[in-house]
Image (cartoon, rainbow, N blue to C red):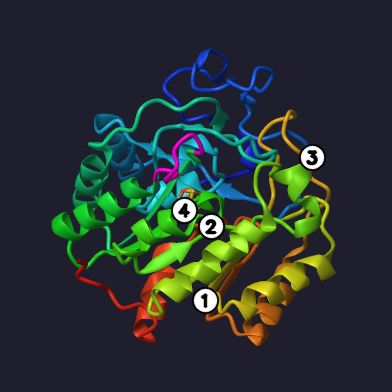
Amino acid sequence: MADVINPQDIPVLSDSSPSDNPRHGVRGSKRHNPEGVVAGRRPAWIKVRAPGGDTYEFVKSQMRSKTLHTVCEEAMCPNLGECWGSGTATFLMLGDTCTRSCGFCDIKTGMPEDMDWMEPMRVAQAVKQMNLRHVVITSVNRDERADGGAPIFAMVIRRIRQLQPGCSIEVLIPDFKGNKDALSIVMEAQPEILNHNVETVPRLFKKVQPQDKYEWALTTLRNAKAMDSLVLTKTGIMLGLGETFDEVVEVMRDLAELKVDILTLGQYLQPSRLHLPIDRYYEPAEFDELKRIGLDLGFKWVESGPLVRSSYHADRQARELSKLNFVQVRSGN
Ligand code: SF4
């Protein structure tokens, strides 16, 4: 059986120590906590698997040899040991530097480097070598570009279709500031699942993600369905940032009205002392209750639990939803 550890014990998975890693600390005072997330007492139900093993090493070698980034590492996801250990990962495209500075996120903020137009090919090669049947691809925000970097998503979808036919593709995209033209570039490549996280309740947007707008998130999900009635839409909410239970349910109602198909609900864990503090830990029974409410509201799938992240068990979701004919793998255009 795999070792089980607390998230604060997860080693940082960069090749250098956090304190001398130039990828971090771009916000000036922001620094990785060497312990991974803020240490302190965690509820007993927050336990994660320690990274290690042959499959984990294989995934790591793919990322290093192809100079790829993953949100698993950049956002210091607590599930890295489990996901990489089972041969999956979430690719982070458009570099490792984001133009926005959300208070919960550990990805560094700054002016990104030039677009790397070969990145989609390298991601597709990794997908093939990892023999993925479902892949999740996300990116940093690239607000310095009018298209927000949307063409990279279209390119990677088409490359994966060429190199790994039959693999369903989930893109977790930025809001592109609600820009319909940018979104249409992604939608024309026909991903099976279009994901955009609302992240929190409207009252907390200014505190949690000051450069984002609730309306942009809803517009993105609404427009995606309008552009492609067969795409499954997906979104996620982090819990424990100061929202009330009722506010979460209100957001779920808004999302259900937009016919969003898949919802993820997970506990916020503070990556460092310089990130937003945890207001409270939701109990497993509350996650169960929110799942029940979500299914009653009409979501096709609700992934709800303390360690749920947007891409957690995404391959399983796609597999189960395809059995019900909700996900139909496309051959592309
Ligand atoms: S939950 Fe997603 S981001 Fe976290 S390790 Fe798994 S694949 Fe990576």
Q: Is residue 86 left or right of residue 12?
A: left
Q: Is residue 333 above or below residue 205?
A: below
Q: Residue furthest left?
A: 162
Q: Earlier in the sequence, mark 1 or mark 4?
A: 4
Location of mark 1 (residue): 261
Quadrant housing residue 59 = top left
Q: Nearer the viewer, residue 209 or 25?
A: 209
Find the magenta span and give its range: 143-149
Label 3 vs 4, first from the N-terminus: 4
Q: Nearer the viewer, mark 4 or mark 2?
A: 4
Residue 19: percent from left, percent from top: 57, 15
The secondary structure that dominates the magenta segment is loop
In this view, 167 is above or below 50: below
Q: Where residue 173 is drawn, which disc sits there? A: 4
Disc 1 secondary structure class: loop
Looking at the picture, which amino acid does disc 1 mark? Asp
Tag 4: residue type? Answer: Ile
> Ligand 1 within 8 A of label 2's CB?
yes
Assess disc 4: are there few (<14), some (14-19) or many (≥20) residues with their C-alpha within 10 Å of its C-alpha.
many
Q: Report the Cα–Cα distance between label 3 and label 2.
A: 20 Å
Which badge, 1 or 2, comes first in the chain's sequence?
1
**Residue, far top:** 20
Among the two numbered marks 4 and 2 on one chain, the one whose residue lies closer to the N terminus: 4
Residue neighbourhood size for the residue with mark 3, other residues' Cα within 10 Å, grouped as few (<14), some (14–19), many (≥20): some
Q: Which mark is residue 277?
A: 3
Which numbered mark, 1 or 4, is in the foreground of this view?
A: 4
The x and y percentages for residue 203 are 81, 56
Q: Residue at x 28, y 41 (%)?
A: 58
Element class at badge 4 = loop
CB atoms at circles 1 and 2 under 8 Å apart? no
